[in-house]
Image (spheres, rainbow, N blue to C red):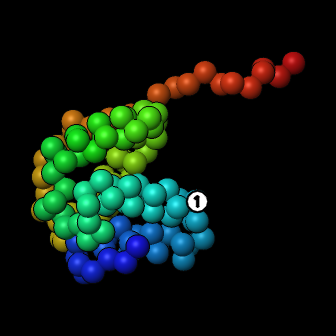
């Protein structure tokens, strides 16, 4: 995925993904890449600005993921990845701070019953 906006949301995400890869954190980079690509695809652009990341768009994206059959923990993982990218942009001065931007989307973790048989 090629990004163009030097200081945009997508660019910030790509920069962080590249940093994770350089650190050898390939699995983490993969999850960030999936979340960023999924959100960009939902929004219809691979070049998201920080101003395009709104409470309403995040809420609709969460609903879209749910309707696509994703489980709550997967949706939460994607939202936490997006929130992390946003927070990095705010810290770098590239993004405006929006209070409670991710308040209306699920970012918790459901505790699931293990499917494996218990050890004897």
Tell me if residue 68 can be seen.
yes
Instruction: Tell me if I can see residue 92 in this picture.
Output: no
- Which residue corresponds to the image point at 36% horizontal and 34% vertical from the top-left? 67
Indicate whether 119 appears above or below 39: above
- State left or right for residue 36 relative to residue 103: right
For the residue pair 78 and 70, the one nearer the viewer reads as 70
| Residue at numbered disc 1 | 27
Give above or below for 80 relative to 53: above
Report x, y in % for residue 7.
22, 76
From the viewer's perspective, tell me whether residue 98 is left or right of residue 109: left
Give percent across and percent down for residue 31: 49, 56
Query: Residue at image x 78%, y 21%?
Result: 117
Looking at the rendered structure, the number of numbered marks drawn on it comes to: 1
Q: Residue at x 47, y 28 (%)?
A: 110
Q: Position of residue 77 (x, y in %)?
A: 43, 45
Q: The N terminus is located in which quarter? A: bottom left
Residue drawn 26% across and 61% down?
44
Residue found at the far right of this picture: 120
In the displayed structure, does residue 71 sit left or right of residue 42? right
Q: Please tell me in which quadrant of the rendered image residue 21 appears.
A: bottom right
Q: Secondary structure at mark 1?
A: helix
Q: Quadrant of residue 105?
A: top left
Q: Is residue 112 left or right of residue 62?
A: right
| Classed neighbour count for the residue bearing mark 1: other residues with Cα under 10 Å, few (<14), some (14–19), many (≥20) | few
Q: Quadrant of the C terminus?
A: top right
């Amino acid at each position: 995925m090629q990004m163009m906006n030097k200081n945009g949301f997508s660019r910030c995400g790509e920069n962080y993904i590249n940093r994770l890869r350089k650190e050898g954190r390939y699995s983490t980079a993969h999850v960030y890449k999936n979340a960023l690509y999924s959100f960009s695809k939902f929004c219809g652009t691979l070049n998201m600005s920080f101003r395009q990341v709104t409470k309403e768009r995040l809420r609709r994206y969460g609903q879209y993921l749910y309707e696509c059959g994703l489980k709550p923990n997967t949706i939460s993982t994607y939202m936490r990845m997006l929130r992390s990218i946003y927070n990095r942009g705010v810290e770098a001065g590239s993004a405006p701070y929006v209070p409670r931007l991710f308040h209306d989307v699920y970012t918790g973790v459901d505790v699931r019953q293990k499917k494996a048989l218990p050890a004897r």
